[in-house]
Amino acid sequence: MPRLTSSQFMAALPAAVRPHLPPALQKFRSVHRSWLCQLYYTDPRLHYEVWNLGERRNRLEIGLHFESRDRALNAALLRGFSARMVAVKAILGPQWEAEHWDKGWTKVYETVPYEPFSTEVLDAVARRLARAITVLQPLWEEIQRRLGK
């Protein structure tokens, strides 16, 4: 099991996620840094993210982040997801949360134990992220329609 650096892992993640998504959701864009990877469809500030919280914190975050400069939009998206968290948790698991975060940002996310990065971990995280996107994206689109966005 060859070890990957965090940078290699994050760079490889978009290609690893794509085949696990339905065709309609495969056309995302991505950006990555050595410690995170973001996938988005329209606005890069509103994105799915895998964030390496580091070996010391022993966690990896997988989630949907609302980091718009419009704090009201971030809060409205959070309210929309908060109202649907029973359904989200029923499908994705009880570890999923929706909360305010830093700088007026909000997020819907889970954390999982950190494991040294390898191709096997890459595949597992890619599948987990693809499952989250498949579940969350239709809800997000519904919330946006209700907001008139």
Image (tube, rainbow, N blue to C red):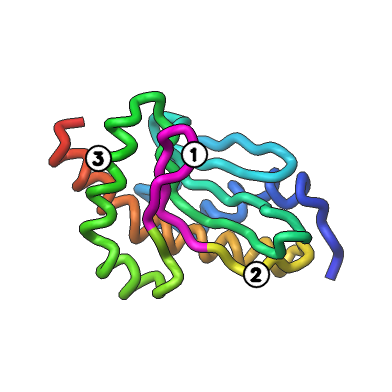
Query: Can you tell which quarter of the image residue 46 is in?
Result: top left
- Residue with the mark numbered 2: 113
Label of residue 40 in the image? none
N-term mark: 1 or 2: 1
136 and 114: which is toward the camera: 114
At 73% from the left edge and 55% from the top edge, which residue is drawn?
A: 54
Q: Which amino acid does label 3 sit on?
A: Ala
Q: Which residue is pictured at 73% across the width and 52% down the height? A: 9
Determine the residue positioned at 28% across, 53% down: 81
> Which residue, given by chain and number where applicable, does mark 1 sit on?
102
The residues tagged by marks 1 and 2 sit, at their Cα atoms, a distance apart of 22 Å
- Magenta region includes residue 119: no
Q: Where is residue 19 in the image (x, y as percent from the top left)?
A: 52, 57
User: What is the magenta range?
Assistant: 98-110
| Circle 2 crowding by C-alpha within 10 Å: few under 14, some 14–19, many from 20 | few
Q: Is residue 34 left or right of residue 22?
A: right
**Disc 3 to disc 1, C-alpha distance:** 16 Å
Are dots 2 and 3 in contact, CB under 8 Å?
Answer: no
Amino acid tagged 2: Pro
N-terminal of the pair, mark 2 or mark 3, is 3
State left or right for residue 143 relative to residue 8. left
Specify the principal SS of the magenta part: strand
**Where in the figure is residue 36, as x and y percent of width and height?**
65, 44
Task: Look at mark 3 in the image and give the residue it sits on.
Answer: 76
* 63 to the left or right of 9: left
Q: How many labels does the image show?
A: 3
Helix, strand or loop at label 1? It is helix
